């Protein structure tokens, strides 16, 4: 919780919206179309299934310095397929992002160092090849940013980030 | 009972109380038109000459009746032609259900003949849309479409139905109660403490010294005219209306200041600019209403009531924002407030109003070789005694109509507001006439807009509709020309218009056609058109280069209006300035 508060202080302009939407074809398109049409800027959008197979959950991160988060919230809520929207920015929340990072390894020593770095970030090496390894890291964006920063020196070949997902505590 | 998909479509339309459908057949909607043969005794189908006009007519039918307007088209080009009409209905919140045929479900996505991704195309210009690929979904989807279209803030809903779905059989029971997971007519976000908000609103009203009510179309949609008048009369607060709010309160009501905004009379905008409280009811602070938002009514507190939560705080921040129907709010609020009047404030407004009257174009006594559009509008009003439904197009004539026709009847004016769709007037008059068959219906259009909808003259004749059509012909795209004159240093670009002989054109369609070039003739032809049983078309040949004033130029503030000149006739002077300007 402390980390969450620190994060909120670091990023006062980032708003996280959680939307429950009907799991029907075209709903993601409707949300994306709304964002484009209203000229709303989104930082990330993560979609996935929930405990209810007829409902999908979207986590949307908005840069509120450029976009009025309350307006996004209300316009989202207006969509016929949107069941609920909540701005969880100021609520106690668990926030996570998952990233896969492919790093170049030129020799065994590097491989060892990278393994150590991965351990320090409580992340895992999930693939080892002759000239590269893949690291799986889970955490808040800052943690992912930090490990990316450290690994930069070894040569990052590929990165994929899921975007933020969030769940309120309790 | 077992029905085909096509029969389900017609059954739903009838069940929903709509008895007119504006449409145009084609390949992918053929099964539905085939089924129509058996429903002709219960539904009248109007064959328009272009699908856009089907959507516009359906829009106007809704505005004239409050019943959902229905339009129908085939797949591909038929459906894409609906787009402008749907966008119009979206911007002006009209309940329209558009039914389009789609290629057979097994062909969807294959670029089949006349296949277009219509739900994709219309996604941002509909309140919601559906692609139906399974006939078992159709009864529920049709019921939802009508429910979504008319409930809450009305809007267009498109249902795209695959050809094979129209042909297949399904068990059908009329659906009377629509339950949807994510949709509710009024969807305030978060919890609203309505009594506390009303109390706060009452306090703001109690403390106001220079309040103005901004009345919008939401009052019409909620059928809250009575509650609104009671609120106005008890509160004693003057009313400014939006363009689409015209008709929520008679314009001869002493507290109705009339239309606000870009071409509203100066005193109306002066009142708003100097107000200390704005009570916005069912309106959305469009840029044509506010001008520059940074300077808009700077000293005013704002109470904003709208059924659409996304409108609150969108353009103008509200001190009290209530997401609810105006009717419900006023029923509670009117008994809470004190009966009051604002003599000093009204005196100030009347002072501004007197100045406006001195600048009235009607003060000009026209010579025999000259006709001005404002005089035509006033003549139509006087000859009809205001007892008619008016459908206007978009542009100068539209603004002159608002200024010089006094709207005393409920929902009398039907016009394209938010989208500003040229070519609206004639199809709108067709839709309005079906909605109000006993009413005298006038379509007033400029020569530009009218030329966009000429084909519908054939529809008027085929349906034998008694519509009076007034064309205000200045051989220009007048409003664009005005902007080029005022904002582009008089550099005219693509605004001069050749026009056909409208009288002969009318005759070619078998319609009574007339022309007027001065005020005496104008009155005469209006009289003759009204006496004539059946459709009549009048061309009013007006001065080519006159401007609509007052005008708040785009981005300017309410108090930076370009005013009408003091009228020379009022000063006993000449009228050279009204004549065509030397280039």
Image (cartoon, rainbow, N blue to C red):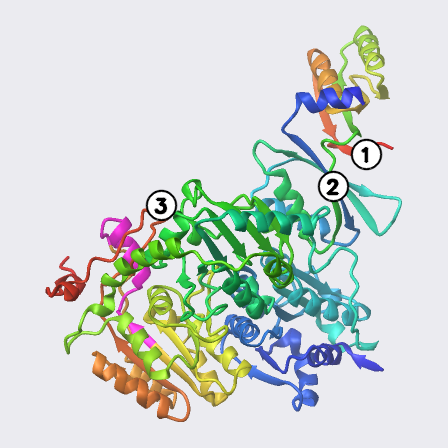
CB under 8 Å between discs 3 and 1: no
Q: Residue furthest right?
A: A51
Residue extent of the magenta highlight: B471-491
User: Which is more toward the observer, B62 or B157?
Assistant: B62
Q: Residue furthest left?
A: B573
Badge 2 element: strand
User: Which is more toward the observer, B413 or B101?
Assistant: B413
Residue at figure coordinates x 87%, y 33% from the top left: A170
User: Which is more toward the observer, A147 or A139?
Assistant: A139
Per the model, the C-alpha gap separating discs 3 and 1 is 46 Å
Tell me the subunit letter for badge 3.
B
Per the model, the C-alpha gap separating discs 3 and 2 is 37 Å
CB under 8 Å between discs 1 and 2: yes
Please tell me whether residue A119 belongs to the stretch shown in magenta. no
Q: Give residue B138's position: percent from left, percent from top.
A: 77, 70
Quarter occupied by residue A72: top right
Tell me the subunit letter for badge 2.
A
Q: Left or right of B327: which side holds B446?
A: left
Say which label, 1 or 2, has the lower sequence index: 2
Residue A86 — which label?
2
Where is mark 3, residue-wise? B556
Where is mark 1, residue-wise? A168
Same chain for marks 1 and 2? yes
Quarter occupied by residue B408: bottom left
Tell me the subunit letter for badge 1.
A
Residue at figure coordinates x 75%, y 73% from the top left: B164
Q: Give residue B62's position: percent from left, percent from top.
A: 57, 73
Same chain for marks 3 and 1? no
Per the model, the C-alpha gap separating discs 1 and 2 is 10 Å
Question: Can the viewer see residue B27?
Answer: yes
- Count neighbours of disc 2 (C-alpha within 10 A) and say few if under 14, some if 14 to 19, many if 20 or more: some
């Amino acid at each position: 919780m402390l980390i969450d508060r620190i994060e909120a202080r670091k990023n006062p302009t980032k708003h996280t919206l959680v939307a429950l939407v009907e799991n029907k074809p075209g709903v993601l398109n409707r949300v994306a179309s709304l964002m484009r049409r209203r000229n709303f800027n989104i930082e990330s959008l993560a979609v996935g299934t929930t405990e209810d197979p007829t409902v999908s959950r979207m986590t949307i991160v908005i840069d509120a310095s450029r976009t009025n988060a309350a307006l996004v919230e209300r316009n989202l809520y207006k969509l016929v397929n949107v069941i609920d929207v909540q701005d969880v920015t100021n609520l106690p929340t668990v926030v996570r992002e998952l990233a896969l990072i492919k790093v170049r390894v030129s020799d065994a020593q590097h491989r060892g160092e990278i393994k150590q770095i991965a351990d320090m970030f409580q992340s895992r090496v999930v693939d080892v090849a002759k000239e590269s390894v893949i690291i799986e890291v889970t955490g808040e964006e800052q943690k992912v940013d930090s490990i990316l920063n450290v690994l930069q020196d070894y040569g990052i070949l590929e990165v994929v980030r899921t975007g933020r997902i969030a769940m309120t505590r309790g | 009972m077992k029905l085909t998909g096509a029969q389900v479509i017609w059954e739903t339309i009838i069940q929903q109380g709509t008895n007119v459908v504006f449409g145009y057949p084609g390949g992918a909607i053929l099964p539905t038109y085939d089924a129509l043969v058996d429903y002709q005794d219960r539904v009248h189908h109007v064959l328009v000459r272009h699908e856009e006009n089907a959507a516009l007519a359906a829009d106007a039918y809704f505005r004239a009746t409050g019943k959902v307007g229905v339009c129908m088209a085939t797949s591909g080009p038929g459906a894409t032609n609906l787009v402008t009409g749907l966008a119009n209905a979206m911007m002006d919140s009209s309940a329209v259900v558009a039914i389009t045929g789609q290629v057979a479900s097994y062909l969807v996505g294959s670029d089949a003949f006349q296949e277009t991704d219509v739900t994709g195309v219309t996604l941002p210009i509909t309140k919601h849309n559906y692609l139906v690929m399974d006939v078992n979904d159709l009864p529920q989807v049709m019921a939802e479409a009508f429910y979504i279209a008319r409930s809450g803030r009305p809007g267009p809903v498109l249902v795209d139905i695959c050809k094979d779905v129209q042909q297949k059989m399904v068990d059908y029971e009329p659906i009377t109660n629509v339950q949807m997971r994510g949709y509710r007519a009024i969807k305030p976000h978060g919890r609203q403490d309505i009594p506390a908000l009303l109390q706060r609103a009452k306090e703001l009203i109690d403390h106001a010294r220079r309040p103005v009510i901004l009345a919008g179309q939401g009052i019409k949609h909620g059928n809250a005219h009575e509650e609104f008048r009671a609120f106005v009369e008890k509160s004693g607060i003057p009313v400014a209306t939006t363009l689409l709010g015209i008709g929520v309160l008679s314009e001869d009501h002493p507290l109705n200041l009339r239309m606000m905004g870009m071409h509203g009379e100066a005193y109306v905008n002066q009142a708003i600019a100097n107000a200390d409280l704005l009570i916005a009811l069912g309106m959305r602070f469009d840029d044509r209403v506010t001008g520059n938002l940074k300077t808009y009514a700077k000293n005013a507190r704002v109470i904003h009531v709208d059924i659409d939560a996304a409108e609150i705080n969108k353009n103008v921040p509200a001190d009290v924002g209530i997401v609810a129907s105006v009717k419900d709010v006023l029923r509670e609020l009117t008994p809470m407030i004190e009966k009051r009047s604002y003599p000093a404030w009204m005196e100030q407004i009347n002072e501004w109003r007197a100045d406006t009257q001195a600048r009235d174009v009607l003060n000009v006594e026209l010579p025999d070789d000259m006709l001005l559009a404002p005089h035509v509008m006033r003549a139509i009003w006087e000859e009809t005694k205001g007892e008619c439904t008016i459908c206007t197009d978009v542009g100068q004539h539209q603004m002159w109509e608002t200024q010089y026709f006094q709207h005393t009847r409920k929902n009398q004016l039907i016009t394209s507001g938010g989208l500003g769709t040229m070519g609206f007037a004639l199809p709108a008059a067709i839709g309005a006439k079906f909605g109000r068959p006993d009413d005298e219906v006038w379509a007033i259009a400029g020569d530009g807009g009218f030329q966009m909808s000429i084909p519908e003259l054939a529809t008027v004749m085929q349906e034998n509709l008694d519509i009076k059509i007034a064309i205000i012909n200045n051989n220009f795209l007048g409003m664009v020309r005005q902007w080029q004159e005022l904002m582009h240093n008089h550099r005219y670009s693509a605004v001069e218009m050749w026009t056909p002989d409208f009288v002969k054109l009318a005759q070619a369609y078998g319609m009574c056609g007339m022309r007027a070039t001065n005020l005496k003739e104008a009155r005469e032809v209006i009289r003759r058109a009204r006496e004539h049983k059946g459709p009549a078309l009048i061309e009013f040949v007006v001065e080519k280069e006159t401007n609509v004033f007052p005008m708040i130029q785009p981005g300017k503030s309410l108090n930076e209006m370009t005013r009408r000149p003091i009228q020379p006739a009022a000063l006993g002077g000449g009228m050279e300035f009204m004549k065509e300007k030397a280039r």
